[in-house]
Amino acid sequence: MSGQLALLGGSKTIDGPFKPYQPIGKEEADAARRVIESGVLSKFIGAWHEDFFGGPKVREFERQCEQYFDVKHAITVNSWTSGLIAAVGAIGIEPGDEVIVPPWTMCASATAILHWNAIPVFADIDPTTFCLDPRSVEANISPYTKAIMAVDIFGHPADMDALMDIARRHGLKVISDSAQAPGARYKGKYAGTLADVGGISLNYHKHIHTGEGGVLFTNDDRIADRLRLIRNHAEAVVGDMGVDDLTNMIGYNFRLGEIECAIGIEQLKKLPTLIGSRQRAALRLSEGLAGCEGLQLPLVTQGYEHAFYVYPMLLNTDTIGVQRELLVKALAAEGIPGLSNRYQNVHLLPIFQRKIAFGKKGFPWQSEICKREVSYRKGICPVAEDFNDRRYLGFSMCSHVLEDNEIEKVVAAFQKVWSGLHELRELNNEQR
């Protein structure tokens, strides 16, 4: 693609908006209408009763998730943040325990740990998958480590064999945060189902959604019981249930409603098609961008299946000769939607830099429950930090429909910018 760059006064490659990604259709609208007409919008009761487990659509959706994802227990919650809080509590984390988590994730992965007055410890990411690097996990284990939280970031599963092996050798539990990877697979098994507890998000900008929501997965009966208790006012129920272990039996209203679950039933039917459409779009992007020097495209190792919530790329700015910020401006000027040149390094957020969470006196870090000084300084996760500071470039795959003609336009815009790198290099030098 030739022509003057739009950033320098030329015409845009993409001159109109892309069609928004919208997996909700008539089937979901009809399902929601039927629930409304039934008059049963929720049937949960926060007491030991048949309806402790929710209404008919909650139970139907959970059974269908169990069958689809081939897992013993699927438990719905009103958000994946709620799911993570429930998961950390259900595995028996104590105040002051340490949980290893990557910095390259949404902040809820770490704050769910803090919620139980436990201490997040950040391990670095793998430079190819962007997921937890098992070597960094091993290096960050201390006598106080009790669990590992793996995040299947951007839709790529973490190296679960390596992480589960580490956990077994050290007596740790594993939580799989597969919020962005519904339908992705690791060695034939669905992401989120290989850990002690895991699950997916049903937030509105995911592959499938119910507006807000999440689904927890586990094959452990005891963990499943405790997830359901934390979801629904555990403290009011444990006595009548005969539960003796009251560890973390502080319950919440993390319940998903009947309308959302009715929508979820229809969404689940569409998941293979929707994942397939993202994968086809990603394949076409990789084919079209293969000739862009200095642009590292996502690699999917044999045995992994990527769901492509994001199409993540890395820039070699030394090879390209243009700083990332200028390159992103040039790409955005061509009309490419959904570009980002930052993710986030959670350990660098103010809550961790200042170590202030509950109250103003630094709890839990500045208290007797924290057994050692845990560092969140810049430099503890060099790969994640370098990617965020200089190299990362992401293209959102769940913001737009991404039909073939739209992908062709994105490829053309990249190729046009790369053909004009000599002009950008001159501008880059002028701006220094």
Image: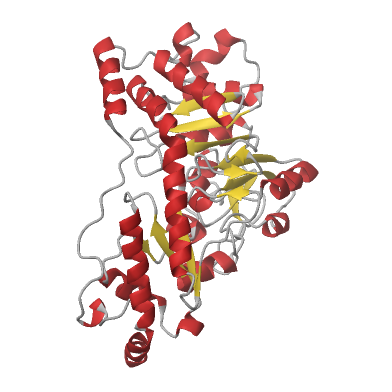
From the image, which quarter does the N terminus lie in? bottom left
For residue 284, what is the image quadrant? Answer: bottom left
Q: In this rendering, would 413 be left or right of 52? A: left
Q: In this rendering, would 333 be left or right of 192? A: left
Name the residue located 37 percent from the left edge and 88 percent from the top edge. 422
Name the residue located 68 percent from the left edge and 59 percent from the top edge. 136
Residue 350 lies, in percent from the top left, at 43, 58
Name the residue located 35 percent from the left edge and 16 percent from the top edge. 42
Asked if residue 193 shows in the view, the reply is yes
Residue 61 lies, in percent from the top left, at 45, 22
For residue 409, what is the image quadrant? Answer: bottom left
Of residues 175 and 370, which is closer to you in this image? Answer: 175
Asked if residue 309 shows in the view, the reply is no
Q: In this figure, which colouring scheme has been used for the structure?
A: secondary structure
Residue 225 lies, in percent from the top left, at 59, 20
Of residues 276 and 214, which is closer to you in this image? Answer: 276
Outermost residue to the right:
169
Q: In this rendering, would 72 be left or right of 424? A: right
Note whether 34 is above or below 260 in the view shown: above
Residue 334 lies, in percent from the top left, at 27, 71
From the image, which quarter does the C terminus lie in? bottom left
Number of labels in the image equals 0
